[in-house]
Amino acid sequence: MKVLAFAASNSRQSINNALVKYATSQIENAEIEILDLNDFEMPIYSIDREKDNGIPEQAQKFYDKIGAADAVIVSFAEHNGSYTAAYKNIFDWTSRIDMKVYQNTPMVLLATSPGPGGAQSVLGAAVNSAPYFAADVKAHLSVPSFFDNFDMEAGKLTNGEINDALSNALKQLAN
């Protein structure tokens, strides 16, 4: 199984990146590719830019990587209750190639934040909009109070209940 994963953040210290790296380390017998959204930086989407310059090459590369994957894992950072600008821009450009951005690929959607909300607002938005963009969401999980439940030095979840929930979510990708 080829698994594509990324944190929907462009922060170099992204806790969502730490979570997605841990999640992918729990998948056995899989080829893992973890994307850095900084590699897909593009001008802010506008219809005028699209008409004047076409769709940037990075959007096509992002779309192609999703299409080549057997499964996708995304961990969403939350900025003011919504998607990060970095993710939203990549998504907006990619959706101009095909509204079915996720190409019916099985997905696990994650989110975390330092606070007790665990980025549930953005995760809810992602889960609810997923069918419109051909995302086959098999499971989703919010990790609240990240630094209370994750050991950054060891790079792993320390909360057994959340770890079990993550394991169960990841098992859904094989189904």
Image: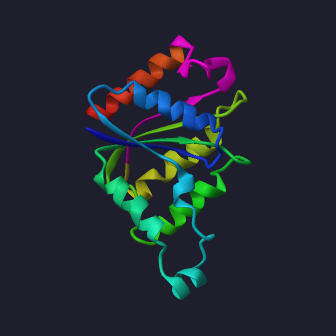
Q: State which quadrant residue 124 falls in.
A: top right
**Extent of the magenta region:** 136-160
**On the rendered image, what quadrant is the C terminus found in?**
top left
Spot the residue most to the bottom: 52
Depth check: 143 or 65 in front?
65
**Residue 73 location, x and y as percent?**
43, 40
Depth check: 49 or 78 in front?
49
**Residue 40 location, x and y as percent?**
52, 59
**Residue 158 against residue 169 in the figure, above or below:** above
Q: Is residue 141 shown to the viewer in this render?
A: no
**Residue 38 location, x and y as percent?**
57, 54
Residue at image x 54%, y 31%? 19
Depth check: 70 or 58 in front?
58
Decide if residue 123 is on the left or right side of residue 3.
Answer: right
Residue 139 drawn in magenta: yes
**On the rendered image, what quadrant is the N terminus found in?**
top left
**Residue 144 against residue 122 in the figure, above or below:** above
Q: State which quadrant residue 18 falls in.
A: top right
Residue at image x 60%, y 84%? 48
Depth check: 128 or 101 in front?
101
Colouring of the image? rainbow
Residue at image x 47%, y 65%? 58
